[in-house]
């Protein structure tokens, strides 16, 4: 799926359902971080969420309809690898694709709670992280435990093109036109049947 030396952004999510906000941040990440590809990792289930998501097949089908782009692959890699926690997924992907430069991508809401993730310091130390602005979370994310603990590793937004090549620990917060799309709102509206 990728060749030696290429840069691949990983956007993990429940995608329950995928929406225009996911497509928007993916296109922005490709441009701003200069990525060769982005792989969407459609999660078997977020370890921190109690409610199970809609069936995998339905989420994959919807994700492919929302994100049709030559540089983006919608994958069930976490199901294939048997991993649920991001640190485990990243270890497994690095072992499987040792010559690919991975970048973890996430919305600002996830930086705000990143210090609750399993082995979050290992992730910071080993994989560059691109953080995409999201309405409501811009300030809390930049003041978060992870942002403060790794303030020294922050790459300014104007230098975002370097993120994938510079090596960890390195994270970069980018401002972008905001999208207020969210899966929970779509579920609450009744437009998507959850599992
Ligand atoms: N509108 C958005 N702007 C910026 N980032 C987003 C947006 N929507 C989702 N993301 C990011 O995309 C990734 C996957 O998101 P996820 O599948 O959890 O969707 P969600 O809309 O956040 O779902 P929920 O509302 O159920 O929490 C996360 O890193 C999340 O922060
Ligand atoms: O590894 C963890 O501890 C962890 C905790 C919460 C979320 N994640 C990952 O973050 C991504 C976004 O999750 P979600 O449920 O907000 O779509 C998805 O890939 C999850 O597996 C990972």
Image: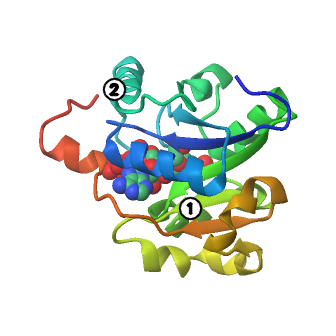
Residue 89 visible in the displayed image: yes
The residue under the point 30% across, 51% down is 182
- Bin the neighbour count of mark 2 within 10 Å (Cα to Cα): few under 14, some 14-19, many 20 and up: some
Q: In the drawing, does residue 117 fall left or right of residue 163? A: left
Image position, residue 120 (x, y; %): 68, 59
Name the N-terminal-most of marks 2 and 1.
Answer: 2
**Camera-side residue: 93 or 63?**
63
188, above or below 132, in the image: above
Q: In the drawing, does residue 82 fall left or right of residue 24? A: right
Q: Are marks 2 and 1 in contact (CB under 8 Å)?
A: no
Q: Which mark is residue 131?
A: 1
Image position, residue 63 (x, y; %): 39, 29
The residue under the point 63% across, 20% down is 80
Q: Name the residue tied to disc 2.
A: 62
Q: In the drawing, does residue 101 fall left or right of residue 86? A: right
Residue 48 visible in the displayed image: no
SS assignment at label 1: strand
Q: In the drawing, does residue 39 fall left or right of residue 181? A: right
């Amino acid at each position: 799926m990728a060749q030696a030396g290429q840069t691949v952004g990983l956007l993990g999510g429940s995608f329950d359902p995928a929406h225009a906000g996911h497509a928007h941040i993916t296109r922005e990440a490709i441009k701003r971080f200069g990525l060769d590809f982005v792989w969407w990792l459609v999660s078997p289930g977020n370890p921190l969420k109690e409610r199970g998501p809609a069936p995998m097949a339905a989420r994959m089908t919807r994700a492919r309809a929302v994100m049709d782009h030559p540089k983006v692959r919608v994958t069930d890699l976490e199901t294939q690898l048997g991993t649920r926690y991001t640190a485990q997924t990243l270890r497994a992907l690095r072992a499987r694709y040792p010559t690919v430069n991975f970048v973890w991508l996430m919305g600002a809401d996830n930086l705000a709670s990143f210090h609750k993730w399993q082995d979050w310091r290992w992730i910071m130390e080993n994989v560059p992280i691109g953080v995409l602005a999201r309405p409501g979370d811009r300030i809390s994310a930049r003041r978060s435990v992870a942002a403060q603990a790794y303030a020294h590793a922050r790459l300014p937004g104007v230098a975002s093109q370097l993120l994938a090549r510079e090596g960890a620990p390195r994270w970069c917060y980018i401002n972008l036109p905001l999208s207020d799309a969210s899966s929970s709102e779509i579920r609450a509206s009744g437009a998507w049947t959850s599992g």
